[in-house]
Image: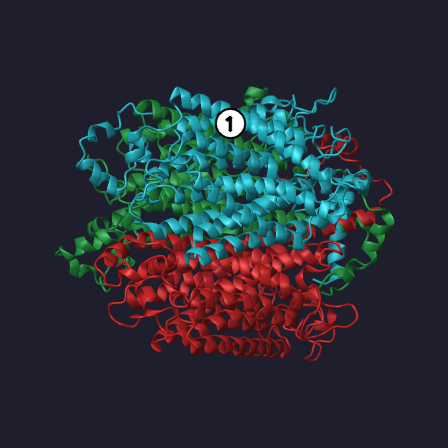
Chain colours: A green, B cyan, C red
């Protein structure tokens, strides 16, 4: 907003000379023999570290978003349970990521490169030995890992038992998320575009910010979980009441879900922008592009679901609109750096159609998906990978990956179609990988009877039985109930 | 890890990094650009959090029966301003062609055309950052019209704001070549521009004027000035929750304001970096100053510690420092904030006396303090800061009370008046026409039962009870034709 | 997520040539006679300022956290009062910090250095004369000062009178927080590790991000306040109902406290990371390390309290878990830059035990601590100072403070034990300092009868009597009450 008026160079030099004296803390002076290139390299590194950590903080705010969206969309009697699940999801993914997750994802040894899995940095060993680069990645990608596990909490809300969700969240952090993360994002991964020896014609898959790794893995797990669990009691009967309190606090529920959606949108800027990993050289020029594309896709995602619901049911439905926004955001994650503004708008708009279609289809099949994670995260996550393969621009691809990628861009933009193929391979393999482990886990626990909460817990709410929280309506019910004795704090679960 | 080891590893890193780079200057320039982009985008992200603030402040201050409607309005406000800003807004605001400079309007970059030639990253960071301003301006209007405007007519106006009403004055004051722009060496009035650093005029005054026009044309909510008026519309039933919501909203607005003011620097190289902290300090002091008078006045006058008045005082203080946060001293920031508290109280009382129903008191907060923001910067702007930024030709163009020549006050007043008339014209035209056509205000029935139950399928418990005993029940069916 | 693929240098130079044209605003080009070292110094300074202001913004978000945690944990009838207290706490600490606080803390004159107190920059005089360094510190440390005062609001919640809390908050900003802040953090402070003439063998205390200065001062004040005030009416009777509304809106209360805890956690990243103060040279390498350690301690803090409560009471208690997370975060504040990842995990885990123990002990003594600030802020704040003295790593200490500190590191890591001694001295002196002023203030106001709210205010709630806010239950009570006339807005306070 200003013209540029420099102080004279003498003023600058005087300032530079007295620079150290102006700091409140006395620091060990910078060595004077440090060369200028080293100084620049040093500052560049510092800025990159700060960039990654600061955007990681913004992504962390998405956890509040997941918690509020989920708590606002399920029955009041389970609210405390849901909030506690999201908190412990964070605590457990921290431990799992520290123990093995980061090691499997990014632990590339110097002596050999494994295209399938990493094998270093278990329990943070040697992680601080270089210069902070590894730790910056640890923190930033942990926030992705926690987001992936939080998505699964949504699909299984209201009927999964506390312990079995938490064990799965730990599994996600320890094994299910890290291994595909190595394939697509780690040095030497078989689908990584930075790997000169990538498995398919030396070309990698484009998943810039985790449309496949975070949202598709989360969405597939969540959908498997919701199918294995079966619907909530009374979900497809005519007197189903979403709130479980006869709509009593629907104003508050609107507030909670709105806060959740806004915070997810807010966090998404960190999610997509931070995925640049660094801001020197050309990356700095692409940074605003990512923010702009994220904005456009969020805006266009809401259009179709909102208008469709208004025309079809004569209702301005806030939940449908918010989920449309989230679908648009999911759909742009893979491509936000590669596509034009108009393409971002198109990708977002189409994701709204996909979300509406899949959600309607789930209802038609009588599958109970409380947060509609199938449409939002699985459907739009898959579309995200396909969308980037349609619309990625040649010049940006070449800027990022060099001239060997000069044909590896969007099919509709004139690319050679291999990008679409590689992205589909990535989707299918990651999908099968996730499907295998989620079916295994949810199937076995379901067979053993651990997966779903008891009828009693579902009727009276998890909060009152396991968390000592009661709503007013619950107290009234309890008093007139013969089951009252089972609600003492010492009851077994 | 001693410094010696570190510098040797740095040298390796340097060799790796300098591959393909010819000299250090290019690398420094490159890093400067990258840092500037990140600075602008990160602050835009912080400003975006203000949308949660607007939504919660408004939902907490209006009747419970309209809450879902209000939240949806704020979401769709974002959706539409994105579309409008992309279509024409940014083009009218910043689309300066190389062949000629138009002082009134831009004419390039429609629908993001020419945005992707690789050299457009500066433009894109401006696009994103100023979009958050544009959507804040439209959200302000939602507050003044809350509780009685139809969702469609609000949304169309929000789209107009992003496509036309906000961008054109934005071009005047902020784009190179705008007739009131400080970066224009040929500015209309003696080659001097108006000082509106972070949008006290462009964002808050436009929003406040539109909101006030809307609230006057709409008329008060049913029963607003009767003795039995109850703000919550639920017999105060969830007033604790309402305090929480408005408090969250106010805090998030304050949080976002730091991004709003600091980010308006748009770059942090050279001398700009020295001013980041000054802006943050001045913003804090004005917020604190704004709360003092309203709080003390209310406790002295009515023996009540009123949380809404205090929160609005904080917001008034924040609005009043937006134009001047860069150019004034710490004591002046506090004083500007303090006076804005008095302006807010005065205008809010005047509106009540005139029986104008302004649910969020946007007139006092955004219009009054927005105008005061423009005037106060021309009272207290410091000469040395003005000269650092705008060069020697601006050496007399600073605060009247600091010894300036008064032209700054003149130019800022001119900016206020022209922007005010511009906004007034379109707001009157739109709201007047819509009101005449009968599409502006919700029906009596919607107002009685709440928009949520009729248009959004949301009911509160009290509504369900009313519905059951009501003969109008059939009209609340979801297939009714009410729009 | 990418390797580095640069354009050729010609591309860069062309870009540099056209750089000015790319700005939307027309700038006068930078003078070419600016030397490269000056340019680098200039950009470094800018980045440092931005870093400090941006992390300060993140810390400011903690105020929402304090407000929501406190409002969600006390009775519904006082909610508006609590929210207003937190807002005015901000307004008053801004004024106090501006008037004298910053001057006492960081106002070091050039002519002489006072190890106990600063004496410059009163009311912001000369604060903007240098180059923004002083102002950046003003803003960042103000957010710490406001956090310290907000902690005290929690311990005294539900029974302290509005005015007496606000006066104490002003005192904290004007005097109680700034003076110890000068001792530990300001140039020339007698406990500052950057002071070559530090009082104890020229060695300083390590309190990197305020475990002692912010949390211990806040925790001690809060504990003194809560003891002097005495418990809330009916707190230790059998029919005590935390919500004061018969649990009616416990779902909403879970949401509020969860939002508060998440925002505190979010803000803590700014708190700890921002305490680096600058990101050039080695500081940039340590930045991700701070974020990683903060994350691990938060995760491990939750473990013991959650499991203990589950085993002992058969309840998954969300409040205990959230307070465990906060304890872990408090415990890592002093040491987050100095310790290894495993040590961060241990420090967090132990803080969970300390929190559980102290909270149980407070209950045993029948001391009413509504937000358990004693366990969280006082206990874990003290442990934070001890933890860093146990586990600080030699190489990081030497990097930050030079070779004269080569023996001044963690006892368990092989240090010479002086660090533990100096940190204990800091804890004890700061504790006594705080104890003196808080006892003086709370004792005198209690004696004068100003400290505690009236019986009537406590029964009907501060909101209805002082803030004109009523809950539904209050209205019902009012109508049938003979005290009704005293609830008119014109009643005296």
- C303, B121: nearer the viewer: B121
Instruction: Give x and y (percent) for residue A352.
Output: 42, 28
Asked where in the image residue C484 lies, by quadrant, the reply is bottom left
Residue sitting at 36 percent across and 37 percent down? B68
CA neighbours of label 1 inside 10 A, class few (<14), some (14 to 19), many (20+): many
**Chain to which mark 1 belongs:** B
Task: Answer whether residue A170 is visible to the viewer in this image.
Answer: yes
Instruction: Give x and y (percent) for residue A3.
Output: 75, 37
Residue, disc 1: B427
Instruction: Give x and y (percent) for residue B261.
Output: 62, 44
Above/below status of C302 relative to A444: below
State the count of labels.
Answer: 1
Instruction: Give x and y (percent) for residue B234.
Output: 29, 45
Q: Which part of the image, by quadrant, shows the C terminus of chain C?
A: bottom left
Give left or right: position of C233 versus A126. Answer: left
Residue sitting at 16 percent across and 58 percent down? A484
Residue sitting at 39 percent across and 46 percent down? A68
Q: Which part of the image, by quadrant, shows the N terminus of chain C?
A: top right
- B431, B346: nearer the viewer: B346
Above/below status of A286 relative to A48: above
Residue sitting at 77 percent across and 37 percent down? B20
Above/below status of B188 relative to B257: above
- A73, C100: nearer the viewer: C100
Asked where in the image residue C272 lies, by quadrant, the reply is bottom right
Give left or right: position of A476 versus A262. Answer: left
Task: Answer whether residue A240 is visible to the viewer in this image.
Answer: no
Above/below status of C339 relative to B173: below
Label 1 residue SS: helix
Asked where in the image residue B145 lies, by quadrant, the reply is top left
């Amino acid at each position: 907003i200003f013209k540029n008026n420099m102080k004279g160079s003498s003023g600058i030099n005087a300032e530079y000379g007295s620079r150290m004296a102006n700091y409140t803390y006395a620091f060990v002076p910078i060595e004077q023999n440090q060369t200028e290139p080293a100084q620049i390299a040093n500052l560049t590194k510092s800025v990159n570290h700060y960039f990654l950590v600061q955007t990681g903080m913004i992504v962390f705010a998405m956890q509040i978003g997941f918690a509020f969206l989920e708590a606002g969309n399920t029955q009041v009697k389970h609210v405390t349970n849901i909030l506690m699940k999201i908190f412990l999801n964070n605590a457990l993914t921290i431990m799992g990521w520290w123990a093995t997750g980061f090691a499997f994802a990014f632990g590339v040894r110097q002596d050999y490169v494994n295209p399938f899995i990493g094998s270093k940095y278990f329990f943070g060993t040697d992680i601080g030995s270089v210069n902070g680069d590894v730790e910056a990645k640890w923190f930033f990608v942990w926030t992705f890992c926690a987001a992936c596990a939080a998505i699964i909490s949504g699909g299984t809300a209201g009927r999964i038992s506390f312990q079995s969700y938490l064990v799965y969240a730990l599994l996600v952090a320890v094994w299910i998320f890290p291994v595909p993360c190595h394939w697509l994002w780690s040095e030497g991964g078989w689908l990584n575009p930075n790997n000169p020896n990538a498995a398919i014609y030396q070309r990698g898959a484009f998943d810039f910010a985790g449309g496949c790794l975070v949202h598709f893995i989360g969405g597939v797990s969540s959908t498997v979980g919701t199918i294995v669990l079966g619907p909530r009691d009374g979900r497809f009967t005519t007197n189903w009441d979403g709130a479980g309190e006869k709509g009593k606090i629907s104003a508050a529920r609107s507030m909670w879900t709105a806060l959740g959606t806004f915070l997810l949108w807010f966090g998404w800027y960190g999610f997509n922008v931070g995925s640049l990993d660094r801001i020197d050289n050309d990356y700095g020029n692409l940074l605003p592009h990512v923010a702009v594309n994220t904005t456009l896709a969020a805006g266009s995602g809401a259009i179709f679901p909102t208008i469709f619901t208004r025309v079809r049911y004569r209702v301005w439905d806030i939940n449908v609109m918010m989920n449309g926004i989230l679908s648009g955001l999911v759909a742009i994650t893979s491509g936000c750096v590669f596509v034009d503004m108009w393409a971002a708008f198109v990708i977002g708009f189409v994701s709204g159609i996909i979300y509406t279609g899949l959600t309607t289809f789930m209802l038609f099949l009588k599958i109970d998906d409380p947060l509609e994670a199938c449409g939002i995260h699985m459907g739009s996550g898959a579309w995200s990978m396909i969308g980037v393969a349609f619309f990625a621009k040649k010049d940006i691809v070449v800027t990022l990956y060099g001239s060997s990628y000069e044909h590896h861009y969007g099919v509709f933009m004139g690319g050679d179609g291999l990008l679409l193929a590689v992205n589909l391979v990535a989707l299918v393999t990651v999908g099968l990988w996730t499907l295998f482990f989620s079916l295994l886990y949810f199937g076995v626990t379901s067979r053993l009877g651990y997966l779903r909460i008891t009828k009693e817990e579902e009727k009276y709410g998890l909060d009152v039985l396991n968390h000592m929280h009661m709503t007013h309506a619950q107290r009234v019910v309890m008093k007139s109930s013969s089951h009252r004795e089972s609600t003492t704090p010492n009851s077994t679960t | 890890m001693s410094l010696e080891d570190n510098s040797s590893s740095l040298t390796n890193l340097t060799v790796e990094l300098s591959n393909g780079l010819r000299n250090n200057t290019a690398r420094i320039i490159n890093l400067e650009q990258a840092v500037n982009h990140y600075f602008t985008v990160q602050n835009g992200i912080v400003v975006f959090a203000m949308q949660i603030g607007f939504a919660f402040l408004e939902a907490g201050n209006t009747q419970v029966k309209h809450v879902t409607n209000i939240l949806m309005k704020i979401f769709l406000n974002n959706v539409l301003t994105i579309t409008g800003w992309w279509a024409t807004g940014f083009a009218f605001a910043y689309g300066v062609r190389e062949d000629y400079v138009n002082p009134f309007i831009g004419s390039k970059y429609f629908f993001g055309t020419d945005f992707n030639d690789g050299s457009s990253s500066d433009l894109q960071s401006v696009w994103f950052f100023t979009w958050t301003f544009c959507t804040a301006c439209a959200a302000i209007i939602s507050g003044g019209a809350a509780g009685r405007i139809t969702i469609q007519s609000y949304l169309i106006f929000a789209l107009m704001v992003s496509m036309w009403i906000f961008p054109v004055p934005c071009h005047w004051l902020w784009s190179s070549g705008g007739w009131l722009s400080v970066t224009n060496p040929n500015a209309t009035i003696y080659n001097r521009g108006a000082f509106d650093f972070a949008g006290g005029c462009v964002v808050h005054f436009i929003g406040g004027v539109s909101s006030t026009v809307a609230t006057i044309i709409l008329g008060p909510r049913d029963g607003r000035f009767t003795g039995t008026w109850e703000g919550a519309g639920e017999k105060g039933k969830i007033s604790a929750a309402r305090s929480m919501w408005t408090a969250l909203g106010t805090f998030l607005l304050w949080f976002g304001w730091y991004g709003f003011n600091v980010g308006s620097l748009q770059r942090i190289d050279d001398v700009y970096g020295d001013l980041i902290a000054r802006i943050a300090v001045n913003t804090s002091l004005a917020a604190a100053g704004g709360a003092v008078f309203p709080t003390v006045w209310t406790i002295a006058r009515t023996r009540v510690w009123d949380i809404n008045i205090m929160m609005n005082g904080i917001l008034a203080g924040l609005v009043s420092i937006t134009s001047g946060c860069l150019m004034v001293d710490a004591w002046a920031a506090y004083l500007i904030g303090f006076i804005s508290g008095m302006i807010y109280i005065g205008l809010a009382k005047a509106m009540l006396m005139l029986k104008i129903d302004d649910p969020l008191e946007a007139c006092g907060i955004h219009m009054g303090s927005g105008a005061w923001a423009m005037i106060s910067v021309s009272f207290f702007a410091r000469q040395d800061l003005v000269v650092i930024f705008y060069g020697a030709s601006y050496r007399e163009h600073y605060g009247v009370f600091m010894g300036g020549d008064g032209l700054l006050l003149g130019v800022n007043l001119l900016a206020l008046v022209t922007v005010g008339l511009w906004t007034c014209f379109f707001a009157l035209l739109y709201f007047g026409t819509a009101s005449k056509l009968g599409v502006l205000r919700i029906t009596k029935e919607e107002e009685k039962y709440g928009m949520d139950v009729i248009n959004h399928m949301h009911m509160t418990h009290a509504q369900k009870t009313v519905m059951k005993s009501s003969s109008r029940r059939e009209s609340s069916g979801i297939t009714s034709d009410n729009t």
